[in-house]
Amino acid sequence: MSQATFEQLGEFLRSRDCFEILTHAYPDGDTLGSGFALALALNQIGKRARVITTGVPKNFEFLSRLVPAQDFEAQTVVSVDVADEKLLGDNIEAYEGRIDLCVDHHAINRVNAKQKHVDPHAASNCEILYRLFRFMDIEITADIADCLYTGVSTDTGCFKYGNTTPETLRIAADLIEAGAKAPAINKAMFDTKTRKKLRLEQEIYATIEYSADGRCAVIAAPLELQRRLGVGDGELEGLASIPRSIEGVVIGITLREKTEGEFKISVRSDKNFVNAAEFCRGFGGGGHAEAAGCTIIGSLDEVKSRLRAAVDEVL
Amino acid sequence: MSQATFEQLGEFLRSRDCFEILTHAYPDGDTLGSGFALALALNQIGKRARVITTGVPKNFEFLSRLVPAQDFEAQTVVSVDVADEKLLGDNIEAYEGRIDLCVDHHAINRVNAKQKHVDPHAASNCEILYRLFRFMDIEITADIADCLYTGVSTDTGCFKYGNTTPETLRIAADLIEAGAKAPAINKAMFDTKTRKKLRLEQEIYATIEYSADGRCAVIAAPLELQRRLGVGDGELEGLASIPRSIEGVVIGITLREKTEGEFKISVRSDKNFVNAAEFCRGFGGGGHAEAAGCTIIGSLDEVKSRLRAAVDEVL
């Protein structure tokens, strides 16, 4: 399918009404920021719109509060930051095959939509929407700026990661000028931890094991620990970055027990020393050169020793 | 003293030679980035220059390696990011009263120099140098960009804090275009922890005490713990942000025992609930509305209960 131009996107949005905007499950700042920004932009040009989610996590409620609830019968369906209809979670059945327009920034996009605009060079989907709104002469209000800034900032780790381009930073500058409350958003996104998360980190630190002369570090979250602390996806998500962040470590491995004896393995590496994707392929997994994953069946000790042996082979 | 203009700074730098560039003690990314960037810029216009430090921490050696060593008798002394000559540490005696030019971004600057350019609106001193170099038609090479980016990024917590302006972000964009290796620098500055630091955080997490219905959190690093883990300033520095980062906490207090029974107190607060400076003034200290400090003498338990009582009064 050919890529819809900004001109075509603008015509499409102006010619339709009663929008439902789909976001992906396990929602992050980019899909929610995109959804609420688009709803506000559509309201501005006289259209009705609502954002469809699998639930807005508490730390993102400041975004959903910006958008007034509107009652209408849906006529148009747009997905934002959704790479595959399977990622719609509980909304798959209701919307599969019904998407009119898909706007996304993932390199591989499998959404089946009548029109698509996919730009993998954009660090966040919110970057694409910022440029689209400017193209359409939509005013970047302070509320729209808050939504877009949230996506631009969270998808780049607050401009820390390699996907941050000069354009990303210039868009963030424009959004702050437009009124985005950047310090408050960044505090909520990057400098706030739940007590549970803190207790989890404390216990996880105690599980760190080094091998290969300190160049490999392994942490583990067995089911017993998850149950005892009562932690779920929300808390466990960020763990994978911990072992690789330790000085001298070039391969960091995180074991998360999904069901009794079934471990989801996350590998983060310095690609100058270890290719994480190749490492994981040895266990039937895959991914990128510096971030990859696989699943291994066994006891915690067995899984650890298989991983350590594989590390000793490559390092 | 009147502020030297960029024109005057340019004339001064071009008319002199054999520069010694002073940085502040306990050096950070901004003073070192400024120092090494200025040395490289001076080399580019045919001048000899060296950076005077109190020692370059290991994680900043990638900057010092960019600047070739030069042997010469010093004729000109410039300080960068130094708010007060007292902050020169071991270099106070050798350089006090001998500074020809002071370039700084601190709101209160007490350096006694023949010429000064102080811009408190700049989030980092490196921002000022970037603008000066552009004004002087100095080419922003990839090496200069690495130095300047380090200062711009570290002094804003990677663009997370409220001092980040639209201009900060646009300068960072320019520096990445000029070749700054932003992802590698950010990984080293923000995503690398020593094993000692990790062990310290693990033990510190175990000391967290909540009061005022979870709106106050207190952590403590007594001498015993510091000695047992063998940690010093480098590891202890970042602790103060931990308690305030806990969800629901509006005043976070960090106790660091300096000598037996003498505690340095760091307070971080949400100014909508507690003014940290006023809180600390009650103990003879001071600071800003959201970050302040004081010193309290007593046993760990005494100090904690005095602080808790003060918190109960304001919350």
Image (spheres, coloured by chain):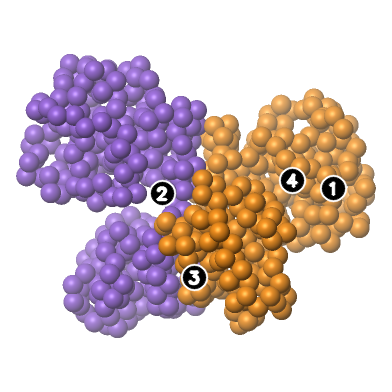
Chain colours: A purple, B orange
Question: Is disc 1 surrounded by few (<14), some (14 to 19) or many (20+) residues within 10 Å?
Answer: many
Q: Is residue A94 left or right of residue A139?
A: left
Chain hosting mark 3:
B
Mark 4 highlights which residue? B81
Question: In the rendered image, which residue does mark 3 sit on?
Answer: B208
Is label 1 on the same chain as label 4?
A: yes
Q: Amino acid at mark 1?
A: Glu
Q: Is residue B156 visible?
A: yes
Q: Which residue is mark 2?
A: A189
Pointer 2 chain = A
- Whether residue B18 is visible here, answered yes or no, is no
Kind of residue indicated by mark 2: Met
Q: Residues within 10 Å of mark 2 (few under 14, many from 20)?
A: some
Q: Residue drawn 34% across and 69% down?
A: A254
Does A261 appear above or below B83?
Answer: below
Q: Residue at x 22, y 41 (%)?
A: A23
Q: Quadrant of the N terminus of chain A?
A: top left
| Residue picked out by circle 1 | B20
Q: Position of residue B176 (x, y in %)?
A: 54, 39
Image coordinates for residue B148, horizontal then vertical, percent: 64, 42
Give the mark nearest the N terminus, 1 or 4: 1
Relative to residue B114, is residue B187 depicted above or below? Answer: below
C-alpha gap between disc 1 and disc 3: 45 Å
The disc label shown at residue A125, or none? none
Q: CA distance from mark 2 to mark 3?
A: 22 Å
Tell me how far mark 1 sits from mark 2, CA to CA: 42 Å
The CA span between labels 1 and 4 is 14 Å
- The numbered mark, 1 or 3, whose residue comes first in the sequence reads 1
